[in-house]
Image: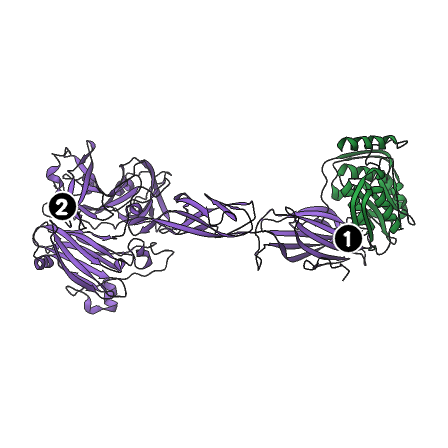
Chain colours: A green, B purple
Amino acid sequence: MRVFGIITLVLALAIVPGSTTAQLSPRASLIPINNVDFDDRALNILAALADRYKVVVGVYGILRGDDSGTIKISIRKGTLKDVLDALVNQDARFEWSQSADGSIHVSIKQAPLSLAAVKVSSLDIENPKRIDAAQLLSRVPEVSSWLQQHGCSMDEMLAGPPPRDWGHFSVRIIDRPLSGVLDEIAARSGTYFWSVIQYNDQPCFINVRP
Amino acid sequence: MNQGLLAHAPNLLNQPGSYGSVVFRFAAHHAMNLHAAAVVTISGAPVAFLVPAHPAGQAAATFRGNGPGSVEGIWWQPLSGLNDILVISNSSEKTVSGTLSLFDASGKQWSEPLSLGPRQTQRMATSDLLQQAGLSGSYGGISLAVPTAASAVSAFHLMYDDTGKSSLSLEMFSRDPAATLQERTWAGNRQWTAWAPMLALRVPDPAAGLPPGTVLQPTIFVRNTTAKQLSAGITLSWRGDSGQGQVKLPALKLDPFATQQWQIGPMQKQLGIPDDAHWALVTLTSPGAPDDLIATASSYDANGQYGLQTRFSVGLGRHFAGGEWRADAAHNTLATVTNGGSKATSVRLTLHYDNGKQKYEMQQTIQPGGQMWVNFADLIHNRTPDRQGNLLPADLTSATYDVQDLSPGPGSLAPATLAVNNTLGSEVHPDWPICCGAVYPGWSPVAFDLLPNVIDDAAIDASNSCTGGILDISGDFTSWFSANPAVAQVTTKRVQGVAPGFTTGSAKGAVLEGGGAVCVLREVQVNVPITVQVPTSLGGPRGTKTTYNNGTLLDCYGQSVTSPFYGYEECEAYTVLDQESPPKTILQSGIQFDENIQVVATNIGLTSHTATGETDSGGYLRDMLTLGSATHAPAAGSYVVDKQTITLHSTGAVVRVSCLDFESTDVTVKDITSAPNTTCTRN
């Protein structure tokens, strides 16, 4: 089984044209899934998939109002792609894609958030603290500029116990979108899941979960 | 005493022949904390008698219970014309009936019934009784045997001459016929052994303060208190100016109830004891049971005026307290601490003065059979520093003391004191030091509530009967066990949880109890309840809310989490409950829990997450519930509804399910553990 896994990973890398970054996650269609049952909110399911299959999943967009609707997914034998397809089929607000490095991005179709695409020219992060990460990102010049232009503030809304801190890691970014920065952090930190969601317009609040 | 009589019974005051008893009641940690004695004296004459109080009730039962027993003594008429008085009292509220017996030296017996009413004291003259009994000779035995309430009976026996030139106390011994060798003999002694540590030999030590030229007549009496023949051995370990040595007296064979006398003075030369040897440690051994043989030793001059009495200690101990010692122009106190064991031991003698506020400590290693000698006046006047460099005040005139064996085990010490009167030549001696026993032995802690695979330290503690201090006597316990090892295992000073349930842990050992001067090594078993607990549910919580507005977010222990912070925090303190019904709180730190927070509904873009936590030193699991951020407080109308599931990390068992409703300014926690499938909604 281990040999098979390595071969499929190599094949996955080989079939992604134009890949210029390190592979963060395998292709969703190559991640087998057995006996999966979900009855939960879409965001919760995405966070659970990221954690369970150690695949980077990022969610971004504008979500206003109550978000309590649940979807049911039940798959006995399939792939991660099957789960993601089932999710966007049932919750039409979302669409998903997988980037060249394997990160899965789930965006809100009718309300995209251009912040995720803001290009970060250079960023070096060494041993960031989990609790400070949102503020650290909001101070990145390109991000800060976007926030100012759009009259938004971005931070992480803590609800419940504070998040567990990360282990030591460092990230060096050159010319990547903010979504790519968050992909890299999610992969290096072992969190695998991130979200950047604008939940309020006046004033504009963006909740980021790095 | 006279003041008391004047106040309450003036008709008895100054009445020849009036007598009675005194009860001294007090409140203390233990009945042995205080010791009292009445001293009867003729002022200006060498006539003084110390009548020690003896513990009553439970405290006395350590040595002599409420069963059968006797008070045993030796009568002696060293000179003609001496008055002798035997006083017997009953300290109980009931009549005690028994048999008073007198014996001549050969063991010939005379008996008559004797009944003592509640708290009654009777006084009699031994010489009259001897005449009545038709017994002859100059010494023999006395016995008062009772079938019940032995601990209530006490006696003392004294002699004096009418001219007030001499006096002599004849010690009475309490005898417990049920006493075993094991509970009274240890430290390598295989036979019943008694020590008289300070027998003054023919030529007295100048330190004794007797007039120059005084020649003493050291005398030892040994009496068989039983109806069977007994053998015994006596060894004299002498010490003097030219050295020290040891000599054995011829083996003894004592017929039933017989008494034998040794006049040591005439034998000294024959025994090879030089004239400049002033003192001897007398060691009496016998294959019989404790107190089957009793013995006395004294040294008086031919007129009975100048003399020194030493007592036979009836066993060894670890810690004794006594006094008072006197040192002034007319008085001094000499003391010895004898190591009656077979191994060298380190001893600390502490003098207490200035109403117990000051102390002076001496520490010394004593070889087997060796003695530590102390001359109280010399310590003061020679400015001898103690082990800490402290000096006794030059004007000190009295002190009390305690002596401790610093080696583990029940101890091998036999302390003794000798009071010296430089003027009168005879002085009342301090009473026997009290054996400081270990009372109220019990487990520490008094109950174990622990988790499977958790090991707790255990100890057996007791209270020092003299000081009230806590003693760790775990080393005296040789057997440690569990009634149900499948629930908990108990080994030396350790209790380990195995599986949920309840059982009893036990430790068996020999504890040194104090019964007045006598130490008794009593076999005891102490038990402790053990509950092996499994975290099954959480109790509470008790919440504490804090609001933040550009402040530093602190966790539930006051530690900084992040800054700045806007919003609020509520710390929920849960207790961990076990599987019992009703459940008991588990007071254990470090129990790990996992927390799954499923976001059920929100309007601020949140997703489910997990957390971990563990109980703190107080046994609390503290859950930090915050809503807020680094830039702004939750906007009005913001909400997050979570279903929180807390599980025990080690097993995954669910211990609490709650609905958390975070609103913009407050959070509510609703316990739904009993119906975990409940849908969580906003309140």
In this picture, residue B130 sits left or right of residue A30:
left
Name the one closer to the observer, B602 or B584.
B584
Disc 2 is placed on an element classified as: strand
Q: Position of residue B124 (x, y in %)?
A: 14, 60
Q: Which residue corresponds to mark 2?
A: B260
Chain bearing mark 2? B
Name the one closer to the observer, B500 or B159.
B500
Tell me, yes or no, if residue A146 can be seen here.
yes
In this picture, residue A88 sits left or right of residue B83:
right
What mark, if any, has residue B599 been given in the picture? 1
Q: CA distance from mark 2 to mark 1?
A: 97 Å
| Residue at the image point whose x is 19% and y is 64% from the top | B115
Q: Residues within 10 Å of mark 2 (few under 14, many from 20)?
A: many
Three-letter code for the amino acid on which mark 2 is drawn: Gln
Three-letter code for the amino acid on which mark 1 is drawn: Val
In this picture, residue B225 sits left or right of residue B508:
left
Q: Position of residue B680 (x, y in %)?
A: 75, 58
Q: Quadrant of the C terminus of chain B?
A: bottom right
Q: Position of residue B2 (x, y in %)?
A: 23, 63
Tell me, yes or no, if residue B554 can be seen here.
no
Can you name the residue that lies furthest to the right here? A110
| Residue at the image point whose x is 33% and y is 58% from the top | B58
Name the one closer to the observer, B498 or B154.
B498
B22 up-or-down from A38: above or below: below
